Image (spheres, helix red, strand yellow):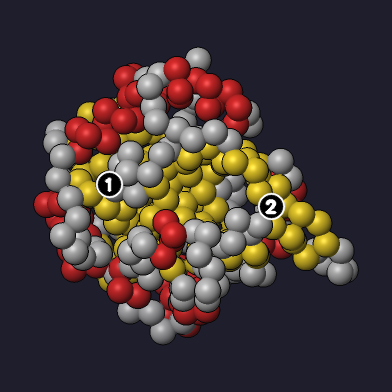
């Protein structure tokens, strides 16, 4: 049985510049978790929302175990599905002919209030490298959810409560539509003119043409830099657009309001265009 698509988190790749990414996202009005260090060699900060989160991901100087981070452009680089059974996901996708790697287990220590320390543990099922030129797709199985979704990390000055949609630009959206159909079934993919969309729990992954991205985000969109397909933008739900605008102004971030949303250009958000919607 194919998995049901739900969103676990989205990943903004900072390569080896996590300090800069951390400062940028704090100016954007996000509360970030303390720096985490994975047993895989990477490090991160999270902006935790209601049921999903945004991860700033990087590697420390001299670390060679995560080449996919250093070799990828800065910006939105991975969209991560949720699962409660990583073994079943691997078996189902393998049977469907989707190129996936066996579940990989890793952890990172978490410092808790009062000085306690526990290990947050995960198992991931990753699509094999080069399955999609748009970026990385994988599944995350949380074994210690209470160490990620903690209430003290869910409150953000910009009012963000969750990811509304992720936007992928592609010269040929049909390629990703085909991949999503193999992963989740043909009826999970909605066709919309030249583009397509995958409903991911309370969120959506939208695959649009380069022209459609430009029409929606204008100069706020990231530069394609010669790429046929790339993860370009995130739409974030906020309790109030005025709330978000106040936090962004406090951070000295230049934004524009268009069509009932606040848009932060990719150049001001580490390579991904952000829009806030109420």
The C terminus lies in which quarter of the figure? Answer: bottom left
Q: Is any part of residue 178 visible from this angle? A: yes
Name the residue tied to disc 1: 133
Horizontal and vertical percent position of residue 34: 67, 69
Going from the N terminus, do you reach mark 1 or mark 2 first? 2
Q: Is any part of residue 262 visible from this angle? A: no
Q: Residue at x 60, y 49 (%)?
A: 50
Horizontal and vertical percent position of residue 253: 38, 79
Horizontal and vertical percent position of residue 17: 46, 76
Q: Name the element at disc 2.
A: strand
Q: Residues within 10 Å of mark 2 (few under 14, many from 20)?
A: some
Q: Name the element at disc 1.
A: loop
Query: Which residue in the rendered view is the most extreme toward the left?
Result: 211
Name the residue tied to disc 2: 107
Q: Residues within 10 Å of mark 1 (few under 14, many from 20)?
A: some
Q: 247 left or right of 86? A: left
27 in relation to 67, above or below: below
Q: Quadrant of residue 236?
A: bottom left
Q: Residue at x 69, y 52 (%)?
A: 107
Query: Which residue in the rendered view is the most extreme toward the top?
Result: 1
Horizontal and vertical percent position of residue 230: 27, 52
70 in relation to 101, above or below: below
Q: 116 left or right of 51? A: right
> What label does residue 124 carry, if any?
none
Distance in Å between CA atoms under marks 1 and 2:
28 Å
Q: Quadrant of residue 205?
A: top left
Q: Residue at x 60, y 27 (%)?
A: 87
Disc 1 and disc 2 in contact, CB within 8 angstroms: no
88 in relation to 70, above or below: above
Work out whether residue 90 or residue 4 is closer to the camera in this orientation and state it: 90
Q: Residue at x 32, y 20 (%)?
A: 186
């Amino acid at each position: 049985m194919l998995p049901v698509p739900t969103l676990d988190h989205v990943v903004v790749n900072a390569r080896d510049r996590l300090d800069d990414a951390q400062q940028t996202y704090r100016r954007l009005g996000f509360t970030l978790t303390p720096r985490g260090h994975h047993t895989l060699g990477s490090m991160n900060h999270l902006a935790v929302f209601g049921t999903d989160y945004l991860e700033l991901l990087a590697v420390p100087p001299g670390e060679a175990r995560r080449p996919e981070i250093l070799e990828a452009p800065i910006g939105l680089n991975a969209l991560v599905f949720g699962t409660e059974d990583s073994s079943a996901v691997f078996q189902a996708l393998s049977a469907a002919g989707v190129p996936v790697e066996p579940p990989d287990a890793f952890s990172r220590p978490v410092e808790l209030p009062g000085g306690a320390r526990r290990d947050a543990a995960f198992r991931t099922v990753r699509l094999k490298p080069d399955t999609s030129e748009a970026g990385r797709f994988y599944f995350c199985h949380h074994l210690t959810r209470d160490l990620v979704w903690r209430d003290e990390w869910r409150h953000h000055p910009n009012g963000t409560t969750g990811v509304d949609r992720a936007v992928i630009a592609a010269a040929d959206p049909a390629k990703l539509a085909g991949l999503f159909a193999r992963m989740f079934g043909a009826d999970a993919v909605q066709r919309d003119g030249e583009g397509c969309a995958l409903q991911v729990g309370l969120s959506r992954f939208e695959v649009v043409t380069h022209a459609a991205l430009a029409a929606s985000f204008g100069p706020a969109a990231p530069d394609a830099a010669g790429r046929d397909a790339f993860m370009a933008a995130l739409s974030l739900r906020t309790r109030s657009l005025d709330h978000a605008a106040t936090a962004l102004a406090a951070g000295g971030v230049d934004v524009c309001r268009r069509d009932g949303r606040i848009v932060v250009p990719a150049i001001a958000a580490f390579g991904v265009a952000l829009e806030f919607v109420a």
